[in-house]
Amino acid sequence: MMPPAESATPARSGGKNLLELREIGKNFGGLAALTEVSLRIDRGEIYGLIGPNGAGKTTLFNIISGLYQADAGRFYFNEVAYEHCKPHVLASAGIARTFQNIRLFANMTALENVMVGRHLRTRAGIWGALTRSPATRAEERAIVARARELLDYVGITRPHQTLAKHLPYGEQRRLEIARALATEPLLLALDEPAAGMNATETAALKSLIQTIRGDGVTVLLIEHDVKLVMDLCDRLAVLDYGRKIAEGEPTTVRTDPAVITAYLGGPPPREIGA
Amino acid sequence: MLRRLLDKLGHRSRLTLTLGAALLLLLPFGVDLALGRGWVRITDFALLYIMLALGLNIVVGYAGLLDLGYIAFFAVGAYTYALLGSPQFGLHWPVWLVLPLGAGLSCLFGILLGAPTLRLRGDYLAIVTLGFGEIVRIFLNNLNGPVNITNGPQGISRIDPVAVGSFSLGSTQQLAGVAFPSVHLYYYLFLACTLLVILVSLRLEKSRIGRAWMAIREDEVAAEAMGINTRNIKLLAFAMGATFGGLSGGLFAGFQGFVSPESFGLMESIMILCMVVLGGMGNIGGVVLGGVLLVLLPEALRHGAGPVQQLLFGKIFIDPESLRMLLFGLALIVVMLVRPAGLWPSGRRQRELTAADGVAQQEQETVYDASR
């Protein structure tokens, strides 16, 4: 169970919808990466996003985390509309993410990586740093304590002073999750967290994601491991060529003819992921 | 607070600290006796350059922003002091006003330069800052007409020495029966300022802001996604670095008594950058070492190379000045080849090297897992 954080988080109450995308479009030159994608993620669910390579999944992630700006449409998060927002604004609203190709602060320690995640929910500025006032020191202690809790929570077994780049691959993925959790997100967006993991690591990851959801964080998951997605997700959407071709519960989606065509490129002889 | 700090230290490190402090305090007298007064002056310059290098270290070493025009902030501080404390305009403002003003003005210039350019990355930022450095120098060179402000290439001379009330650092002072020559007095002032800059750097490094700088250096996109307002945090690094540059610029003007645009060329910017890179980027000890070496070695060579050649060959083959640049270039290449992280890298970088075994072992494990 994740211990509660001390500082003020974005409101966890509110309507049933946490994230709602309305007709999001994004073009790169002449290429339509996303076309009129609408979807809705409820509070407390694990929502999957799957699709063949190049379907626009990561582009969608980049839009909801503010790294890209959508060319059309808008999205609502926690009942607030966001359009043309900087990444730090969205992070502060409560969207945290990991990256498909791990983007840790490679030359900082595991602990420091998570401490950076606390930046958003702490306040000390230049003056506090220079004077080391009691308030700053207390805050700093709280940051370290929280970072250690989160490292244990995601199951980093190596010493916390290990440089991020010296962690084993699986732990690097977990560290990215710990760093994202340090920002106290309402929505945790995981971009292919199981990529490159062996079966043992994937199983551990699966239970970690379930624990995170159990602790009240909504999870959005991009994953190629279809079995993992089917097992974990409450609902999922399928993207193909930038369009949403199916949405619903795993059991419905896996039998959807459009999905099977997208994955197998022809009329289906059998279900996928069975 | 000092008492508490001393209590925490062991007997041995307390001894080291006391010895170090005594050494630093007696250094100008020792240097004066052993090498002559000229070398005390060179030591003073070394301290000024250390301050500059520490300021640049915040921008380059911590935040990872390559600034090739850093000397411009030094120039702003120096000219602020020169214009407000010299016969140029007949102004003789007190030092305690002019120095902070110069530092503040540099800070402002840092923000002015940073605001439009910090969205650039890597090489592009380097080129823009290089241009900024040159623009400032050319302005100073040409602001003698139609209204004469900077006196153009002639520079501003007869600048007031640093003085508090009637106690001037520009002349020999008797304190407790000991005669302190001007260069000695400046040494103590610069030492105090350098220690202050070191303290500030140390505290910033281990703070929320310092971590944000390093995060930006490591991966700007990830830092942004973790909620760091990268524009503001980078501006802060620029402003802090510029402030230190402006402070040392003011001290330089008061010490030297003369400023001209010549002192603020591109070579100076590169020299300071070399101190940071050569010593060990991001490590305060390394930067100090780099500053000391790059000021003292060329001077030693300048004084030593002529006589040595005279002694060996009976005449001077290579002009010491060109030999200086030659050896300097060679030393840089050797250091970059042999110790790419700098002469005294930060603990972080040392760990990068020593922990290589750990990675090998881990890769072994992964291979094992995969083949199972």
Image (cartoon, coloured by chain):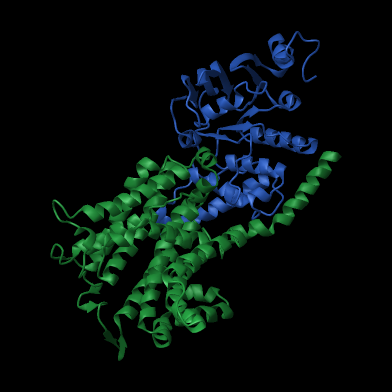
**Residue in the picture at 39% in, 51% down:** B238
Residue B188, relative to residue B33: is it above or below?
above
Which quadrant of the figure contains the N terminus of chain A?
A: top right
Quarter residue A33 falls in: top right
Residue B81 at x, y = what percent? 24, 63
- Residue drawn 71% across and 34% down? A194
Q: Position of residue B260 (x, y in %)?
A: 26, 62
Q: How many marks?
A: 0
Along the line of sight, the residue nearer the viewer: B300 or B123: B300
Q: Position of residue A270 (x, y in %)?
A: 80, 12
Q: Is residue B259 left or right of residue A241?
A: left
Residue found at x 46% / y 69%? B323
Q: Colour of chain B?
A: green
Chain rendered blue: A
The picture quadrant where one finds residue B103 is: bottom left
Q: Position of residue B366 (x, y in %)?
A: 78, 44
